[in-house]
Amino acid sequence: MIIIGFESSCDETGVALACTEKGLLAHALHSQIAMHREYGGVVPELASRDHIRRILPLTRQVLEQAGLGMADINAVAYTAGPGLAGALLVGASVAQSFAWARGLPAIPIHHLEGHLLSPLLADPAPEFPFVALLVSGGHTQLMRVDGVGTYELLGETLDDAAGEAFDKTAKLMGLGYPGGPALSRLAEQGDATAFDLPRPMMHSGDLDFSFSGLKTAVLTRLKALEKETGTLSDRQRADLAAATEAAIVDVLSSKAIKAMKQTGLKRLVVAGGVGANRHLRAHLLKAMARLNGQVFFPPLDLCTDNGAMIAYAGALRIKAGLAVLDGGNHAFTVKP
Ligand code: KG4
Ligand code: ZN
């Protein structure tokens, strides 16, 4: 079966084609980053309007890429949530219209399930079961994944998500939007040991996270430095960025390793936008080598939001006989 997938939950319009037998066939993406940059963050109204503009040209593009026509599509998958309401409606409306016009099933996909299963698009792909570290702009969770549709929440953030911690501290430092990649680039020139930042809940004994205190700690350091020296030097800015990144990566890695020990599993999968962070990748690769375990990441271009993960999750659900059609509710243990 061939599935077309639509993603429009935030600031990326993604359309893709996946096959239950051959995997991903084609995907196309339009990022709205340039449009939102001048506002310092995502403007929901502008996001929705841009999804409307992009979604049909992207659909045409993936069909051309794969050399297929509308008549070759057997099912439609789309991101049902969580995300910006207006933005989600664009993908849902297009997907349901497409499905209705052609008499096809429309399969709602939980956005996080898309992220969670995206490392299966990597080569080599992980086998079930595995521990998943889901780190996006809106969520930070550790899950035990036994198969498609069988997810157990092991721990999650009690306040800010890891991506949010990157974005908010980057904003405090005047680094613009999106903050994660900008802060990470600046951190490459800095010395992480120059500032001693807290590792919130690192030794809490459970698998939960908290990042809001880190943001406050960075703000306090910034204010103190500004009082001392007026404006921060480039060196100080890079050092503070490196120390922030190191604090976030330390907490994420130590909790992920704790989850591996607690479950006894040897495979770790990292998904979501923060999974693109080079420091996190290097840190986890080293730690897993020490533990005789394996860590898997989605291909870099599929870490952040995309249509490929939605089409692919639709294909995997169909294959597993778990394609809940519209009106149904996926058994996904995360809150909407
Ligand atoms: O998964 P995603 O594209 O969207 C959500 O579902 O939220 O994740 C976006 C988040 C943003 O917070 C962004 O700053 C962060 O991922 N991000 C990064 C990097 N690339 C994206 N954070 C740290 N380092 C990166 N290289
Ligand atoms: Zn996402």
Image (cartoon, helix red, strand yellow):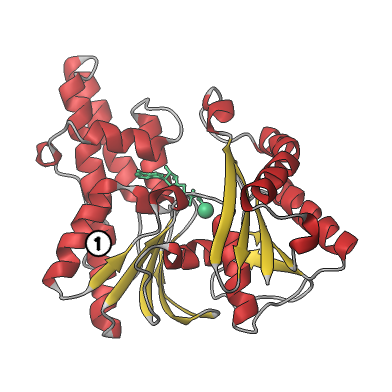
> How far from the left and from the top, in percent, is residue 208?
35, 68
SS class of the residue under badge 1?
Answer: helix
Quadrant where the image shows the C terminus: bottom right
Q: Is residue 229 above or below residue 162?
A: above
User: Left of 276 or right of it: where is 79?
Assistant: right
Q: Is mark 1 within 8 Å of ligand 1?
A: no
Q: Of 271 and 258, which appears nearest the observer?
A: 271
Residue 60 visible to an observer of this rendering = yes
User: Left of 92 or right of it: where is 18?
Assistant: left
Residue 111 visible to an observer of this rendering = no
Q: Residue 167: which quarter of the image?
A: top left
> How far from the left and from the top, in percent, is residue 113?
54, 67
**Residue at point 60% right, 45% down?**
10
Give amino acid for label 1. Ser
Q: Is residue 151 above or below residue 108?
A: below
Q: Is residue 207 above or below residue 118?
A: below
Q: Residues within 10 Å of mark 1 (few under 14, many from 20)?
A: many
User: Left of 143 or right of it: where is 318?
Assistant: right
Name the residue tied to disc 1: 253
Q: Of 258 and 111, which appears nearest the observer?
A: 111
**Residue at point 65% right, 59% down?**
81
> How far from the left and from the top, in percent, is residue 176?
43, 27
**Residue at point 65% right, 84% down?**
321
**Residue at point 53% right, 33% down?**
33
Q: Residue furthest front?
A: 67
Q: Of 195 and 312, which appears nearest the observer?
A: 312
> How far from the left and from the top, in percent, is residue 282?
21, 53
Q: Of 277 and 75, which appears nearest the observer?
A: 75
Q: Residue furthest top?
A: 230
Quadrant where the image shows the N terminus: bottom right
How many marks overall?
1
User: Left of 37 or right of it: where is 46?
Assistant: right
